[in-house]
Amino acid sequence: MAHLTAQELLDLVLDEGSFESWDEPVDHSGLDPTYRQELAAAAERAGTDESVLTGRGLMHGRPVAVLVNEFRFLAGSIGQAAAKRIVSAVRRATAEGIPLLATTASGGTRMQEGTPAFVHMVDISRAIMDHRAAGLPYLIYLRHPTTGGVFASWGSLAHVTVAEPGALIGFLGPKVYELMEGRPFPPNVQTAENLADRGIIDAVVLPDELPLLVDRALSLLIDPPKPQTRELRKGEVTRKRSAWESIQITRGRHRAGVREVLRYGSDETLRLQGTEKGERDSAMIVAMARIDGQPCIVIGQDRTTQTRFKPMGPAALREARRGMRLANELRLPLVSFIDTPGAELSPEAEQGAIAGEIARCISWMSTMRVPTVSVILGQGCGGGALALLPADVVIAAENAWLSPLPPEGASAIVHGDLDHAAEMAEAQRVSAIDLYENGTVHHLVAEPEGDTPELLARAIAAEVGSQLVALRAR
């Protein structure tokens, strides 16, 4: 696959003719003559005066700041001049209040400049974190190769991180490892695809797909809410079934889950993957979404991926906390979806801090700085469910439920058998209607006869959208 130059990437992503360079001429007069010759040769080869181009442009009319690595200039390495250029651009983007889009292709710190260049990675990181602290989006596209100090600083600090297919991405250059250790670096470890599988980056994206992804991300992150288009379900929810009957319904194979809500209730969705720390649990969905016109961050327990043999583990809750952190930073509402038969109970989960992760999720949910809505969509079992419950507004589907243990477990504790599960469900008041009556749930969404997963998902989305509108109005 041909690798795009810095200018070709700018032309691909930005509106035609909209790019405005922020780069000042580079002064190399005080450098070693031999090094100056290297820089001159690199500039002639690359067609750029340094390894980084910065500036401002438009993306479908939206202003955006850009940082683009040029690998043909000394392998995209970052010297002092390039580092100062990056810091200046990030600071300017923050001052102007616009999103930052970066794309890397670099071997890391420029060895010809040694430690003085190396320590500038701190300045770059500080500038980017100040940009994030201002509530401004930072998106990055990692290209082949991205290694060393670039990946260990501004390459790993974005809200959304994607990479080109087959890109070599890692902290340690494989050639350096081979020379130092006397053996080749294991294959396929430092590939974009492996990093995506392990939850270190969010996705692998072809260059031609990059404009669509950036457009979607900016739409969700900075465009205003849109009018609601889905119909609210009216009328009072009455007690038509026993708690046990509702429990059986939520365990049904075709029950609507968070996937259906995003499919039928979100106008735009951008999935994120993993904790960014080498963990990924498919039991948790984290996404930027526009639920019935309202932009938000979604964290949701995926009913289709949780089984008796692969329950929701501590990594899933760490993914949820990534979503909470993003919502706070980007100043977007947070919507959580509860639908779990329970968190993982195993030695591995204990060593993975399952209890601590439940506690941290509860504490984060309880202290969010943005509007929050939680939805008890189906099964709400144990601490894993409670972890996503605290919110400004709690919604429940008519047949949803919440309990400290599955009713069978409660029966085993109280009666020494599983035969009293239905009785325990009633006694523990687990049903959505009970939760509404005791104030845990604020709004119920009816499930009439003949309901379908699509119709329920649309109704849930309409209720969520309505509550987000009301919370924004406050």
Image: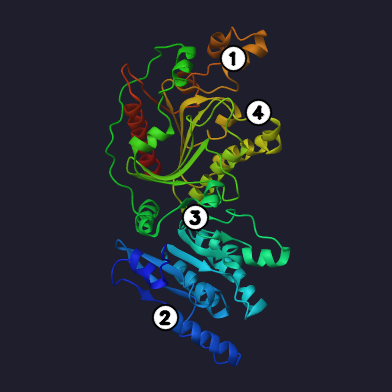
Q: Nearer the viewer, mark 1 or mark 2?
A: 2
| Residue 185 in the image, given as x and y percentages of width and height | 65, 58
Residue position marked by numbered label 4 in the rendering: 345
Q: Nearer the viewer, mark 4 or mark 1?
A: 4
Q: CA distance from mark 4 to mark 3?
A: 32 Å
Count neighbours of disc 1 (C-alpha within 10 A) and say few if under 14, some if 14 to 19, many if 20 or more: some
Judging from the image, what secondary structure is the residue with disc 1 in? Answer: helix
Residue position marked by numbered label 2 in the rendering: 47
| Residue 380 in the image, given as x and y percentages of width and height | 52, 26
Badge 2 or badge 3: first in the primary sequence? 2
Q: CA distance from mark 2 to mark 4?
A: 58 Å
Residue position marked by numbered label 3 in the rendering: 159
> Which residue is at 57% across, 78% downward?
79
Q: CA distance from mark 2 to mark 3?
A: 31 Å
Badge 4 or badge 1: first in the primary sequence? 4
> Which residue is at 42% across, 77% downward?
22
Q: CA distance from mark 1 to mark 2?
A: 70 Å
| Residue 280 in the image, given as x and y percentages of width and height | 56, 43
Residue position marked by numbered label 1 in the rendering: 408
Badge 1 or badge 2: first in the primary sequence? 2
Quadrant in the picture for residue 190: bottom right
> Which residue is at 55% across, 50% downward?
194
Count neighbours of disc 2 (C-alpha within 10 A) and say few if under 14, some if 14 to 19, many if 20 or more: some
> Considering the image in quadrants, where does the N terminus appear?
bottom left
